[in-house]
Image (cartoon, rainbow, N blue to C red):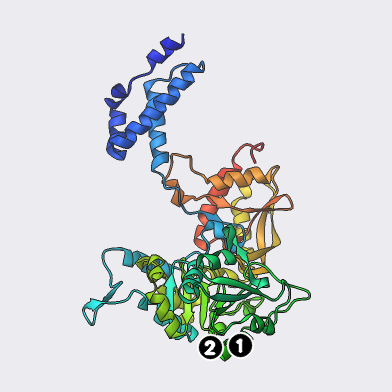
């Protein structure tokens, strides 16, 4: 019986002669089509051997087409962030401004003056496209851009402290997302880690007692980006460490982690140290991210004294960590927004932080009206947004969210993460991308603070499709 069913399955050669497969070959290439066709036939044979009837040619061709669409679909695609976490590491961190996106697109087409001095008609430096702006904005003598802040820390310690001592408070031996640990990076650089003080209290004299004029290369301060020390605690101010460093001619490095150029306090948040403040306090080297609170593309910023930046720029590791033309174009466009005083209105991260409560409530009510026809109980409720991205731990912003009462919020959230498309319908990705929400008090919440205004239509479509599923599913 099974052998007779197996004989009903068409051969690869026979299917290749059909018009439908010929169209797939034209669209996806012969190699990919053959791979998909063979995989489909293998599955069909296994199904027959398990007791199922043989599939016909039409069904096999349709499954081949579906598999090819899935294989050709990018694994990286847009999503709607309705979680209320502004800098969401898992969802790509900071959305880029329109100006940054336009600059990156323009420079990616054809050639550019990335490393070409137009006036001299000779080779130039790629670093000038961001370093001049960084210096104007912060007061630093010079600046260098690498591919992320971890790279900035690694390059600095490798170039300036290899086989020498780096002093750091025990309270600052932090771990950030993905298991990235400051002590591990320091060891990778070849620097000798010297811990000073205690977990909760460290003083300047702790650094002074551990300091060796001949062997100490750097005094390092690491900002508590993703946690808080409270209670019986003490850490010296950066300016105090600078005084100690100047006394022994030892540079002080300040790793800000997220880093910001704008003060967060006017927007109802705790104060986050700015890059300008670290430079003004006298830090010899300041490192920070370009893609968190700064709101640009992923990058690591190194700012400080010109002689030290010069050493970093000439170190062999700098070439391995350098950024490409699109990153520099996006970063330059982002920095220009700060220079022109337009960051709060142009850069999505800051627009989200500064959005008035009444605007958030209005958008949530708009979603509620649009989804009224689904028959699902929902209400606009007060909630809290967070900055995220290892920035401002414990700090929240008041918001208004659309809360949905469904039998299984987890099932609905899973459905929303799939979007409205079927696996083979890649073109729908742009029209209605998958959506990530959050669950609180057994309700599914949609926070408009982190949904771009232009995504409202896609959000409604995704929600309608997910809510149209059977009640037992959501």
Q: Which residue is mark 2?
A: 249
Q: Which residue is mark 1?
A: 244
Extreme residue toward the front, this view? 214
Q: How many marks?
A: 2
Please tell me whether residue 191 is drawn above or below residue 430 in the rendered image: below
Q: Residues within 10 Å of mark 2 (few under 14, many from 20)?
A: few
Question: Residue 368: where, in percent of width, then height?
Answer: 63, 55
Whether residue 85 is visible here, answered yes or no, is yes
Q: Quadrant of residue 211?
A: bottom right
CA gap, disc 2 to disc 1?
Answer: 9 Å
- The earlier-in-sequence mark between 2 and 1 is 1
Whether residue 396 is visible here, answered yes or no, is no
Using the image as rendered, state which of residue 313 and residue 160 is in the foreground. 160
Using the image as rendered, state which of residue 438 and residue 452 is in the foreground. 438
- The circle drawn on residue 74 is none
Secondary structure at badge 2 equals: loop
Residue under the image location 51 percent in, 18 percent down: 50
Residue under the image location 74 percent in, 53 percent down: 441
Question: Residue 291: where, in percent of width, then height?
Answer: 50, 68
């Amino acid at each position: 019986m099974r052998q007779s069913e197996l004989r009903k399955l068409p051969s690869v050669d026979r299917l290749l002669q059909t018009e439908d497969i010929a169209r797939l070959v034209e669209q996806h290439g012969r190699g990919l089509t053959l791979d998909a066709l063979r995989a489909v036939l293998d599955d069909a044979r296994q199904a027959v051997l398990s007791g199922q009837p043989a599939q016909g040619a039409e069904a096999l061709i349709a499954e081949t087409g579906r598999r090819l669409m899935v294989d050709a679909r990018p694994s990286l695609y847009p999503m709607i962030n309705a979680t209320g976490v502004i800098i969401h590491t898992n969802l790509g961190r900071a959305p880029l401004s329109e100006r940054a996106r336009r600059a990156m697109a323009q420079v990616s087409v054809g050639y550019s003056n990335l490393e070409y001095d137009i006036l001299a008609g000779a080779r130039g430096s790629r670093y000038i496209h961001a370093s001049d702006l960084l210096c104007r904005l912060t007061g630093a003598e010079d600046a260098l851009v690498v591919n992320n802040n971890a790279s900035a820390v690694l390059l600095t310690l490798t170039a300036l402290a290899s086989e020498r001592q780096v002093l750091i408070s025990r309270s600052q031996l932090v771990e950030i997302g993905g298991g990235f640990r400051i002590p591990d990076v320091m060891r990778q650089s070849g620097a000798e880690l010297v811990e000073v003080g205690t977990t909760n209290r460290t003083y300047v004299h702790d650094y002074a007692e551990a300091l060796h004029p001949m062997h100490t290369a750097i005094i390092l301060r690491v900002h508590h980006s993703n946690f808080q020390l409270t209670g019986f605690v003490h850490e010296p101010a950066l300016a105090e460490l600078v005084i100690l460093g100047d006394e022994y001619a030892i540079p002080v490095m300040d790793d800000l982690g997220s880093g910001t150029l704008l003060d967060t306090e006017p927007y109802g948040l705790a104060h986050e140290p700015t890059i300008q403040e670290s430079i003004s306090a006298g830090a010899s080297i300041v490192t920070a991210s370009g893609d968190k609170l700064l709101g640009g593309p992923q990058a690591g910023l190194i700012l400080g004294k010109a002689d030290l930046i010069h050493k970093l720029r000439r170190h062999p590791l700098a070439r391995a960590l350098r950024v490409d033309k699109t990153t520099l174009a996006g970063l330059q466009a982002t920095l220009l927004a700060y220079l022109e005083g337009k960051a709060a209105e142009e850069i999505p991260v800051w627009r989200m932080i500064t959005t008035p409560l009444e605007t958030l409530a209005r958008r949530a009510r708009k979603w509620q009206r649009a989804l009224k026809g689904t028959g699902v109980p929902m209400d606009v409720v007060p909630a809290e947004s967070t900055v995220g991205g290892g920035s401002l731990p414990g700090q929240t912003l008041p918001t208004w969210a659309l809360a949905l009462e469904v039998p299984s919020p987890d099932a609905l959230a899973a459905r929303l993460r799939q979007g409205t498309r079927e696996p083979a319908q890649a073109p729908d990705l742009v029209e209605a991308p998958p959506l990530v929400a959050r669950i609180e008090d057994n309700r599914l919440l949609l926070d408009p603070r982190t949904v771009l205004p232009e995504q409202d239509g896609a959000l409604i479509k995704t929600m309608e499709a997910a809510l149209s599923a059977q009640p037992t599913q959501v």
